[in-house]
Structure formats: C-alpha cells, structure tokens
C-alpha cells in the first residue's frame, strides 16, 4: 500500500510542479494574452466567415439542384406539348376531328379564281 500512496504523491507533486512551471511559459502570461486579443478576434472572425461561406455554398448547391430539377420537368412538359401538337396537326387527325362538323378533305386540287 505504501507504493500506491507514494506513486499518487509523486503524481500530485509532479502535477503541482507542472502547474508552477506553466507560470514561466511566456504565452500563458496575462500580459501576452492581453496583447494577443486582437489576433484572437481576427481568428474568430475568420472562423465565422468560413462557416458562413460554407453554409452559403451548401445553400447555393441545393438551389442549383432544385433549379435543374425544375428545368428538367419544364423540358419534359415542353416535349410532351410539342409531341401532342405534332400529333393533332397531322392531316389525318385534323380530318377526323372536323368530320363531326361535316367538313371533308378536298378530292380536287385547289384552283384560282380569275376576275374578268
């Protein structure tokens, strides 16, 4: 048991000695810390700018993907409308649709009326 208490005392003593030695480290003294505050504020501002810029980039990528998806859907709708217009403007389809109104295709070629 004496060995355990001796090792604990050595650890405690070494910790206290370490803390005393930290007072001698120049960048842990209050004068150095006080003079470094503007630099720490600058680093903090850089960190905020980095986080804001990253958030902005992610938002822009999401908006870009959303816009691409909307554009793809609009292209599909355009192609569908174009195909439907092409199908309904065929001569045979037009002839079938106007048959109810008793309009028929010409069997004779068109002719010119000349005024005398």
Image (tube, rainbow, N blue to C red):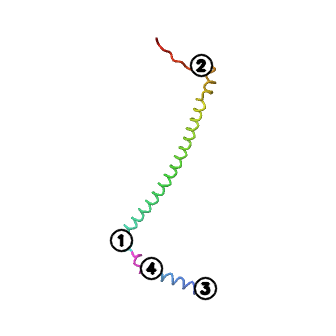
Q: Nearer the viewer, mark 4 or mark 2?
A: 2
Quarter placement of the N terminus: bottom right
Report if residue 62 lies within the magenta region. Answer: no
Marks 1 and 3 sit apart, C-alpha to C-alpha, by 45 Å
Disc with the residue nearer the chain's start (4 vs 2): 4
Q: Which residue is mark 3?
A: 4
Disc with the residue nearer the chain's start (1 vs 4): 4
Q: Which x, y percent locates residue 20?
A: 45, 81
Front in this rendered view, residue 80 or 89: 89
User: Can you say whether 88 is above or below 63 in the image?
Assistant: above
Q: Residue at x 55, y 44 (%)?
A: 72
Marks 1 and 2 sit apart, C-alpha to C-alpha, by 102 Å
Asked whether the residues under the numbered discs 1 and 4 touch, taking CB atoms below 8 Å apart as contact, a structural biologist would say no
Disc with the residue nearer the chain's start (3 vs 4): 3
Q: Which residue is mark 2?
A: 108
Disc with the residue nearer the chain's start (1 vs 2): 1
Tell me the element at label 2: loop
Asked whether the residues under the numbered discs 1 and 3 touch, taking CB atoms below 8 Å apart as contact, a structural biologist would say no
Q: Nearer the viewer, mark 1 or mark 2?
A: 2
Name the mark on residue 22.
4
Asked whether the residues under the numbered discs 2 and 3 touch, taking CB atoms below 8 Å apart as contact, a structural biologist would say no
Asked whether the residues under the numbered discs 3 and 4 touch, taking CB atoms below 8 Å apart as contact, a structural biologist would say no
Q: Residue at x 48, y 14 (%)?
A: 114
């Amino acid at each position: 048991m004496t060995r355990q208490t001796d090792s604990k005392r050595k650890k405690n003593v070494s910790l206290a000695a370490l803390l005393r030695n930290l007072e001698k480290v120049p960048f842990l003294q209050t004068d150095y810390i006080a003079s470094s505050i503007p630099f720490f504020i600058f680093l903090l501002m850089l960190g905020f700018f980095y986080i804001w810029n990253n958030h902005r980039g992610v938002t822009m990528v999401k908006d870009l993907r959303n816009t691409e998806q909307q554009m793809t859907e609009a292209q599909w709708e355009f192609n569908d409308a174009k195909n439907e217009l092409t199908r309904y403007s065929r001569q045979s389809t037009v002839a079938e649709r106007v048959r109810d109104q008793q309009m028929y295709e010409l069997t004779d070629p068109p002719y010119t009326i000349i005024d005398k």
